[in-house]
Image: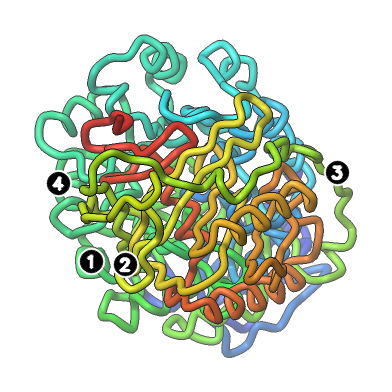
C-alpha cells in the first residue's frame, strides 16, 4: 500500500499523482449516474475522483466508462484447468480483479500442500486471489479422496493474508444433524465468514443451516429457492459456470432493491467457455440484455460482492479504495478495453514480470491397470437405478429403468441412451471400481474418461464399449491425468492435466485448443452435451441431489447413503 502521507497529499493535489486516468466517465454505484472527472491513483489506491489532477503518468480514457473491478465470489481455479497464473492471465483482462477461490479440488488430491500452493501463488499474482480454507475434504464419507483435512489441519492453514474464512460447507446433512467433525470446523470460524452450499434446502433445515453462521449460498437454481434464502439473511451468489447455469433462472430476481444482497460467481468455468462467451463480463452483459438495470448488475459484480465478504477496501471507484478499475466501451457491452488491478495495468508486460512458482501434485494418478471385464455391472434384478442428466445443471434425476441381465451383466442399451458409467479410485488407496448407468450423454460408441471428478477426483468414465473404457482409463495414468476420448481402441483426443490430475502446465490458449478438439471428438461419438467433460465430473459429486456415483457405488443423495 502507498505511504499514508503520500496518499493524502496526492488526493489533495499537493503532490502529483502517480497515475491519472483522464477523459472517462465514472459509473457511480451509489446513484447510477455517469460522472465526469479524472481518477487519481497513488500506488495501489485511488486517491481522487470527480476533479482535475496532474499525474506522473496520464492515460487517456476519453469516451470510455470506468467501473470497479469485478469480484468472482466463488470459484475453483482448478476447474479452469490451468494454474492460478494462467487463470489470471485469462480472466484479468476481462475485468476480474478479485477471485475468491476454494482450492478443495487440489486439496482432495494432495491435501494441505495444495492449499499452500494456492496461498503462495496468491502472493505472486496481479489480481487479488483470496484463498478460502476448504471445509469438506473429502466432501462426504461415501467416497475415497487422496487426502483429508480435519479441523486441526484446517486450523494449521489459518493466518495467511489471502484468507477470508471457511469455504463452502457442502456437507449440509452433517451441519443440520450436528456431526462432531462438522461442528469442530464450524467452531473454528464462529463469528467469521463461512460460505454455504445447500442445494434445495428449505424450511427448518435451512433455518438450522443458516443458524450455524453460514452466510452465502451459490446453489440456488430457482427464484423461489433464492428468495427464501435472501429472506433468511443469506447473500445469494448467482452462478453461471460451464455446467451449472443458473443465471437465466435467477436474473429476474436481481433488481435495484435486491442487488445489495446478491453477487456473481462462476464456480467452475473452463477456458473454452471463457473464450467463446466470457467470464463475469458475459454474465453482466447477458443480464443487462435480459432487463436487469446496469446499476443492479454492476453492484452485484463489485460493491455488493465486496460488502458480502467484508472487503471494505474495494467495490467502488472512490478515494481510499483499491485501484481495481475496468475501462469499458459501454456498460451494456461490458467490453473491457483496459483493466487495472491494484493500480497495475493488466497487460502482457505486467504478466511477464511475475515471479512464478513450481507446480505441485505431479504423479498423482496411481490407479490400477483396468481391463474390459472390470466394467461389467452385476445385478440380480432388472430394475436399475439410473442417473438422469439435467443439462445446464449439476442436479440429476434419479431414474429407474428395466435393464436385462445377460450372462450376469447388465450391458449398455444405446437405443435407450443407457450407457455405462464407472468410477475408478486413482489415489492408490484401495483400487475400488464402481459401475452404474447414466442417461443423457447420447453416446453411441467409444468412451470418455477424466480425472476431473468432483470432489474426490478419481477417474470417471462413460462408455458404450468396455474395451474403450479400459483404454481411456489406463491412458489417464500415463499422462498424469486429464481428459481423453477413445474409439475402437484409439485415442482420438486428449488433454494432459499433470498438476494433481487437475491443471495443465500449458498456456490457457493451448488448453482452449485441446478442449475444442475434445469436444469435437466427443460429438463424433454421438454426445450432444455442450460441456460433456465437466458434466461427467459432477456425476460423481455426492452432495448434489439426486443420484450420483463414487468409487464406492451409486449414491442416493436425498437419503445420503450408498445404494446397496
Q: Marks 2 and 4, how far apart in space?
A: 20 Å
Image spot of residue 364 (x, y percent): 74, 37
Identify the disc placed on residue 228.
Answer: 4
Residue with the mark numbered 2: 296
Residue with the mark numbered 3: 357
Identify the disc placed on residue 130.
Answer: none
Q: Residues within 10 Å of mark 1 (few under 14, many from 20)?
A: some
Viewed as shown, does residue 400 lie left or right of 104? left
The residue shown at (36%, 29%) is: 171
Q: Is residue 24 above or below residue 274?
A: below
The residue shown at (11%, 29%) is: 204
Residue with the mark numbered 1: 255
The residue shown at (38%, 21%) is: 191
Residue 37 in which image quadrant: bottom right
- Whichever of callouts 3 and 2 sits on the residue coming sooner in the sequence is 2
Image spot of residue 109 (x, y percent): 64, 34
- Whichever of callouts 2 and 4 sits on the residue coming sooner in the sequence is 4
Residue 54 in which image quadrant: bottom right
Q: Nearer the viewer, residue 64 or 532?
A: 532
Amino acid at each position: 500500500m502507498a505511504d499514508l502521507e503520500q496518499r493524502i497529499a496526492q488526493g489533495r493535489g499537493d503532490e502529483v499523482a502517480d497515475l491519472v486516468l483522464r477523459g472517462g466517465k465514472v459509473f457511480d454505484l451509489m446513484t447510477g449516474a455517469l460522472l465526469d472527472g479524472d481518477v487519481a491513483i497513488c500506488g495501489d489506491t485511488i486517491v481522487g475522483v470527480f476533479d482535475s489532477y496532474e499525474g506522473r503518468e496520464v492515460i487517456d480514457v476519453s469516451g470510455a466508462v470506468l467501473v470497479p473491478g469485478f469480484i468472482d465470489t466463488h470459484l475453483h481455479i482448478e476447474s479452469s484447468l490451468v494454474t492460478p497464473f494462467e487463470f489470471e492471465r485469462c480472466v484479468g483482462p476481462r475485468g476480474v480483479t478479485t477471485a475468491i477461490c476454494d482450492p478443495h479440488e487440489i486439496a482432495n488430491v494432495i491435501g494441505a500442500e495444495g492449499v499452500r500452493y494456492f496461498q503462495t501463488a496468491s502472493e505472486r499474482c496481479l489480481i487479488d486471489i483470496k484463498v478460502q480454507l476448504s471445509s469438506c475434504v473429502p466432501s462426504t464419507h461415501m467416497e475415497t479422496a487422496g487426502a483429508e483435512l480435519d479441523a486441526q489441519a484446517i486450523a494449521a492453514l489459518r493466518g495467511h493474508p489471502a484468507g477470508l474464512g471457511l469455504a463452502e460447507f457442502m456437507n449440509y446433512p452433517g451441519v443440520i444433524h450436528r456431526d462432531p467433525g462438522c461442528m469442530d470446523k464450524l467452531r473454528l470460524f464462529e463469528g467469521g465468514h463461512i460460505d454455504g452450499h445447500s442445494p434445495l434446502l428449505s424450511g427448518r433445515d435451512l433455518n438450522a443451516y443458516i443458524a450455524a453462521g453460514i452466510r452465502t449460498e451459490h446453489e440456488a437454481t430457482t427464484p423461489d429457492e433464492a428468495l427464501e434464502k435472501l429472506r433468511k439473511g443469506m447473500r445469494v451468489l448467482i452462478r453461471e459456470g460451464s455446467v451449472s447455469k443458473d443465471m437465466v433462472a435467477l436474473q429476474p430476481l436481481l433488481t435495484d432493491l435486491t442487488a445489495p444482497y446478491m453477487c456473481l460467481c462462476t464456480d467452475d468455468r473452463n477456458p473454452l467457455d471463457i473464450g467463446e462467451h466470457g467470464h463475469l463480463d458475459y454474465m453482466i452483459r447477458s443480464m443487462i440484455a435480459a432487463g436487469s438495470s446496469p446499476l443492479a448488475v454492476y453492484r452485484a459484480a463489485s460493491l455488493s460482492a465486496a460488502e458480502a465478504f467484508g472487503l471494505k477496501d474495494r467495490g467502488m471507484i472512490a478515494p481510499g479504495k483499491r485501484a481495481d478499475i475496468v475501462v469499458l466501451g459501454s456498460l451494456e457491452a461490458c467490453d473491457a478495453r483496459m483493466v487495472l488491478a491494484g493500480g497495475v495495468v493488466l497487460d502482457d508486460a505486467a504478466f511477464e514480470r511475475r515471479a512464478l512458482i513450481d507446480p505441485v501434485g505431479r504423479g498423482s494418478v496411481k490407479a490400477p491397470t483396468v481391463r474390459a471385464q472390470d466394467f461389467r455391472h452385476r445385478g440380480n434384478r432388472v430394475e436399475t437405478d439410473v442417473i438422469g442428466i439435467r443439462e445446464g445443471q449439476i442436479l440429476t434425476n434419479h431414474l429407474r429403468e428395466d435393464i436385462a441381465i445377460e450372462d450376469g451383466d447388465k450391458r449398455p442399451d444405446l437405443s435407450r441412451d443407457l450407457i455405462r458409467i464407472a468410477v475408478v479410485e486413482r489415489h492408490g488407496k484401495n483400487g475400488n471400481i464402481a459401475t452404474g448407468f447414466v442417461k443423457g450423454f447420447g453416446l453411441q460408441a467409444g468412451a470418455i474418461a477424466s480425472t476431473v471428478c468432483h470432489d474426490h477426483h478419481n477417474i470417471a468414465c462413460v462408455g458404450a464399449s468396455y474395451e474403450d473404457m479400459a483404454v481411456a482409463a489406463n491412458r489417464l495414468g500415463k499422462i498424469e491425468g486429464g481428459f481423453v476420448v477413445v474409439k475402437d481402441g484409439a485415442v482420438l483426443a486428449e488433454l494432459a492435466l499433470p498438476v494433481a490430475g487437475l491443471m495443465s502446465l500449458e498456456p490457457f490458449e493451448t488448453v482452449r485448443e485441446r478442449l475444442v478438439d475434445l469436444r469435437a471428438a466427443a460429438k463424433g461419438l454421438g454426445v450432444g452435451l455442450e460441456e460433456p467433460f465437466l458434466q461427467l465430473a459432477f456425476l460423481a459429486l455426492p452432495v448434489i441431489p439426486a443420484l450420483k456415483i463414487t468409487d464406492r457405488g451409486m449414491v442416493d443423495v436425498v437419503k445420503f447413503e450408498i445404494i446397496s
